[in-house]
Image: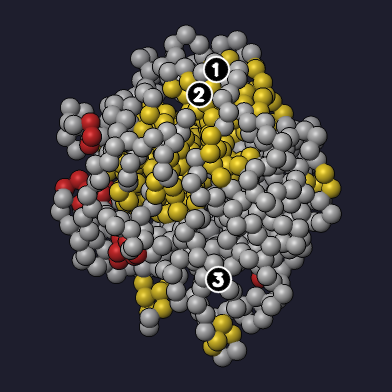
Amino acid sequence: MSRVIKLAVAAVGVVLAVSAVAVAAIPGADVRLTRDDPADPGGGYVSDYTMVTGVPYSDATLAECTRSRGRQNEPAVAIDPRQTQVMVGSSNDYCGVHNVTVDGVPQPVGPIWLGYYRSQNGGGSFQSSLVPWYPGDASPYASRARIRTASAGDPVLAWDKHGRLFAGAEASEDPAGTPKGFGDVWVATYENPAGESGSTLNDGKEFKRSVVVAKGSSAPGTGGKFNDKTSIEVDRTNTACEGNVYFSWSSYNGNGGNTVNFSRSTDHGQTFTKGINLGPANSEIQFPDIAVTGNGHVYVTFRQFSGAKKNVADAVLITKSTDCGKTFSPPRTVRTFTPYDASDVPDPEEATAPSSGPEEPMDEEITGGGARDCGSLDAHCASNYVFFRRDTQVRSTADQKDTGSENVYIVYDPTIPGTEVPTGTTYGSVGTGTGSQSGVYFVRYNGATGAITGPTRISPQARGHQLFPDIAADAGTLHALWWDSRNDPAYSPQRPIGNFADGTQSAGALDVYASTSSNLGTTWAASTKLTDVASNPNWEQFGGRTVPFAGDYLWIDAQDGQTFGVWTDWRNTVAGIDQREPASDVTGADVKQCRAPVDGTWGPDTCPRAGGLDQDIYGDHTP
C-alpha cells in the first residue's frame, strides 16, 4: 500500500443523495460502485459523518476522490439480512493517492484505503465513501478509530442479524512516515444510527469503531511479522454462537514461512481474542475463508502450497470448530489439485530515458517482474507477455438457514487436468514453460460425516480460463460467480489471459459469469454473462505505470432472494503511450500519461486524472 505524507484539509462540502431506483432485472445493467468521476451525475465521495448527520464535511482526500478517476480493486459486497434493499461494497481504493498538487503536478502521496459504497435501493445505485480514519480525515468520526496504520486493503464484509456491518482489513505503514511496516489486521463496525429498533434502511450506516485484531512488527516493509489475506463472517444462526464475529488471516513471519490465524469477537466487534494458529506444521498456507453452518459450527478453508517442501501437495484444506470458534480440529485435506499459478522469468528492459520526479511505489503485494506478474521497464519479463498476478485460490460458504445439514460449499480455480501444454516461452501456469487451462471447480463437504462430493466443474466450456470464483448460499440455493475468458480472441492455454502470441493485448479478455444450483451443487444451471462490457485486465496502471494488478478476488452475496456480485473493471481506462519505453515495446498495455523531457530524463505523469488510472468496481444482480 502507499506511504502517507501529511495531508492538507480542505473545507469543501459534499452531500450526495441516494437515487430511488427500482431493483434492476436479474441480471440488469452493470452498476458502478466507485463513483470517482467528475462527469458522473450525482457521483463523488462523501464522508460517512455527512452521510449519517447531513452536516457537510470534506477534506483533500475526499475532494480528490470525487475527481480522481483512480484505481480500485479486490471488491467485496454484503447484503443486509434484515433489509435486502441495503447493501454495502468495498475495495482497495486508491482514489485519494494524488490528493496534493505541487507546481501544477499531482503528487502520489495520499492514502490507499478501504472504500465504503452504500446502496439503499437494492443495488440500483451506490453512494461512494471511505472508511473513517484514512490519513487526513478530520471528521468527528475519525477519533472513533483505534488503529495505527497509514494504508489499508484486502476488504472483507459481513452483517449480523441486528443491523451491524463488520469490515475487515489488512493494514500497513507508519503514518509518521518511518519505514516501519506494521502489517496489522483490523475490523471496523458500522451500526444503525438509531439502534436496532431504527429504520432498517439505515442499518450499517454509522461508523462506530475500528479495532486492531492482530499487530505485525515494526520491521521495515514486510520484512518482519506481517498479517494479510483476510476473511470475516458473523454467526446469524439461532444457536448459542449467534452474534459472534469471526476473523481469519494469513500471518507471515518474515522468513518465508506463514500460517493461518483465527480470532473471534463476542461483543459485537468491540474486542477480539488473541489469534490461534489453524495451520499444519511444515506447510505454507494462505487464502482463508470462513463458513458457518446452521448449527453454529465454524469452518475455515484455505489453500496449501506445495512449494519446495517434500510430501506436501497443493490442496484445499478445512478445519472445524464445534465450540463457537474457541478451538479447531486439525486441518483435513479436502482435495489436492494441480494449480494454475501464473509465472515468468524477470527480464528488465532498459528505458529510453529514466524517469525523474515522484512515481507511486508498488503495493507491497505487487511484485512486478518478480515472476508472478509482468509488464514493462523494470517489470518486463522474458516472454514479453503482460499479465496480472493470479494464483489458484479457495473460497467457501455455508447456508446458515439450513439446520438440517452441515454442508460447506467450496470453489477453487486450478488447472484442468489434461490441458497442460508446452508454452514455447518462459511463461507458465504449471511451472516455467508449461501452460494450461484453468477452470472453476465445486466441492460439497459434509461436516457432520466428513463425506466429500466432487470436484465438478460448474461451467465446463471447452474454451477460456476461469478464475477468482466466489460462492454464496441462501435458503437452499447456491450462487457462484467468476471471471471468464471464453470470449477472449487471444485465448490460448499457452499464454496468459489477454495476450496474443506476439505479446499484444486483447481489447476484451475478461467477462464475469455466474451460475446457480438448486440441488446443493449436484448440477448447475447454464452460466449467465453479467458484464455489459468486456475488460482488458492487463493495463499497466501500477508501479509507476509499468505493471498491471487486478487484485486477488471477486465477491458475491445472497440474502432472501436478493443476489449481487461485484468485480474489478477496466471499461473506462484510457489508452496511451509510455515515452520511457523502448520503441519496440508495442504491447498495447500502456495507459494515458503525460510526461515531459527534463534534463535528459522523463518527468512524472502530470495527468493521472485523465483516465489512464481509471480502474473501477462494478456490480450486478446475479442468477
Marking on residue 520: 1
Farthest residue, direction bottom: 599
Measured from the top left, where is residue 138 in percent x and y?
A: 25, 59
In the image, 323: left or right of 443?
A: left
**Element on which disc 1 rests:** loop
Residue 550 lies, in percent from the top left, at 55, 52
Residue at 68% across / 34% down in the picture?
Answer: 461
Q: Please name the amino acid that badge 1 sits on.
A: Leu
Give neighbour class at mark 3: few <14, some 14-19, many 20+ (Cα, 10 Å).
Answer: some
**How packed is label 1: few (under 14 Cα within 10 Å), some, or many (20 or more)?**
some
Find residue 477 and report its horizontal and vertical position in percent: 48, 20
Residue under the image location 41 percent in, 74 percent down: 106
At x 21% / y 55%, what residue is drawn?
A: 15
Q: Quadrant of residue 67?
A: bottom left
Please state which amino acid type lies under the numbered disc 2. Answer: Leu
Q: Is residue 403 visible?
A: yes
Tell me which numbered mark, 3 or 1, is placed earlier along the sequence: 1
Q: Which residue is mark 2?
A: 478
Q: Nearer the viewer, residue 204 or 83?
A: 83
Q: Secondary structure at mark 3?
A: loop
User: Residue 190, how many percent across, how many down?
Assistant: 29, 39
User: Which of marks 2 and 1 precedes in the sequence?
Assistant: 2
User: Would residue 321 be seen by someone viewing this image from the given angle?
Assistant: no
Residue 29 vertical position relative to residue 575 in the rendered view, above or below? above
Q: Which residue corresponds to mark 3?
A: 576
In front here: 242 or 560?
560
Can you say whether 198 is above or below 14 in the image?
A: above
